[in-house]
Amino acid sequence: MADRIPAEPLLRLEGVHTHIGQYHILQGVEFDVPEGGITMLLGRNGAGKTTALRTIMGLWQPSRGSVTFEGRAIGGLTTPEIALSGIAYVPETMAVFSDLTVEENMILAARSGPLDRKRLDWIFSFFPAMQKFWHSPAGVLSGGQKQMLAISRAIIEPRRLILIDEPTKGLAPAIIEGMIGAFEALKRETTILLVEQNFRFAASLGDTVAVMDDGRIVHRGTMTALSADEALQTRLLGLSLDAHQ
Amino acid sequence: MIGKLLSYDPPKSRVLGVVLAIIVLGLALAPFLFPGAAAINTAAKICIFIVLVASYDILIGYTGIVSFAQTMFFGIGGYGVGLSLYFLGPTWPVLALGIVIALILGVALAFVIGLVSLRVKAIFFAMITLAVASAFLILATQLSELTGGEDGRTFRVPELLRPGTKLLEAPLFGLEITGRIAAYYLVFLAALALFLVALRLVNSCFGRVLQAIRENESRAEALGYRVVYYRTLASCLSAALAVCAGVLSAIWLRYTGPETTLSFAIMLDVLLMVVIGGMGTLYGAVIGASLFILAQNYLQKLMGVASAATEGFPLLPRLLHPDRWLLLLGVLFVLSVYFFPTGIVGRLTQRARK
């Protein structure tokens, strides 16, 4: 069922179980994120994708299993320690600090010093709205602009791995098209683990894919192979690529 | 120059800027503009409470921490200086020693409370601070050999600050320059400096992290910020400012006691001042403290005038009787919260943005 994925993984989850209160959400999740490119984490609603990202980030502690990043176990580390080890996280809720300006949001994310002007221009080339609203409170931005800010914040400094949770959720198709361009450029310099419901978006960007169902990984392989196999899509995700075109 | 002094965070509304300028000028010239013991006393109290309210706003407004121990730190400042001057004599080195002892004790206590309890949920932290502050109040009342118990301690201040000390032979603009005036300007300038320090603090990167934590802890953690560390540091800095306010209060009153520094009535007043002025904006501390203390001191007199003026009308003179000033203050508070849910400064800033 799984294709062969080359290269030493940047991130590895082995037998990860996560409980939230009385609920057993992740039930032995196993998958690798290879270095470079975009790994898509797909699955139906409630499959455990967001919990998987939050567990990697230390926002939920795994009750069993191991999370290894660059060969180092990060399962027991705190969220700030994980963040400082080089993992950025963009939650699905357009997670900006609304009382702070766009500039202040970016300054907060730049942990190693002042903002790098060259990198900022690079970000503005994908998301011009960030430059336009630089001194405005993030709370006044539209949904799409907030999402752009959340992503900009994650890439304001080079990171080893970026976890992004449903970046297209609730966004207009034109904004999504613009975001595809940004991710194309971004994946040339860093590794991305992206949770997504929009299969067309996932198919156009993903290099490798892991599909979750009921708290487990039910498929691993390349995105090309999954995109080409409609029967597999229907079986795993209950949809076909055509349905989303 | 002014921009730098205000940490490039000037008032965002012209009306607010004008009101703040009037308050600062009024306080700066208070001894000359409003002669008389009551007026200068009110002005000094406003200065002291601006610092205390600003210190509390750093906690509740900027960091989202609800604490009931702010008056405890205010009391530590008052008792630190008061007891030092009482037992060791009224000299400047003793005053400095008292300030240092109070700051060390206050910050150490804030650090311990912060480390132990900032990991728990907000409501439990609030309860812990309430318990610690109650314990401190009881301790201050019961250790009467040291603290003077419920009567507190009256002490002498260095000679320069004593009311009997004449600093200038001839009156200046009709005002006799005594140690009392020197004490007022010490309080005013120290309060101004402390307020500007607080403004610098909330406009620094540290202040932005506090605001980020207030808005969403997990997001701040996901950016690599250790929430407990920042919260504990905010508690310590806020405590240090409250201690300084207590020091100024003790120097001004030449007295320290549980009623003037540690009582929960003061804590409630501080909370009201923060809410009226506007949480999460230090300028709110200036507006809130000024309005509240002016109302506290002059509402009764105003009501007396209004009651006399409405004589002959049914019910009104009785409603406006000076004895009912607390009732009117309560109504004014409810109205201000209703019409200015984000505080006066918040409302003015929102209006200016539109």
Image (tube, rainbow, N blue to C red):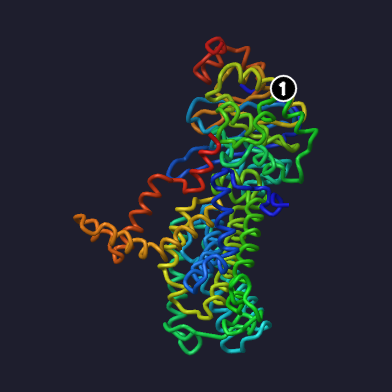
Residue B284 or residue A153, whichever sits in front: B284
Residue B105 in view in this figure: no
The quadrant the N terminus of chain A occupies is: top right
What's the residue at 62%, 34% (across, down)? A150
Q: Which residue is mark 1?
A: A184
What's the residue at 57%, 13% (across, down)? A241
For disc 1, the chain is A
User: Residue A210 at what x, y percent from top left?
Assistant: 61, 27
Residue B311 or residue B282, whichever sits in front: B311
Q: Amino acid at mark 1?
A: Glu
Residue B279 or residue A167, whichever sits in front: B279
What's the residue at 54%, 37% (across, down)? A51
Question: Is B114 situated left or right of B205 in this image?
Answer: left
- Give the answer, above or below, for where B19 lies relative to A129: below
- Give the answer, above or below, for where A100 lies relative to B144: above
Element marked by disc 1: helix
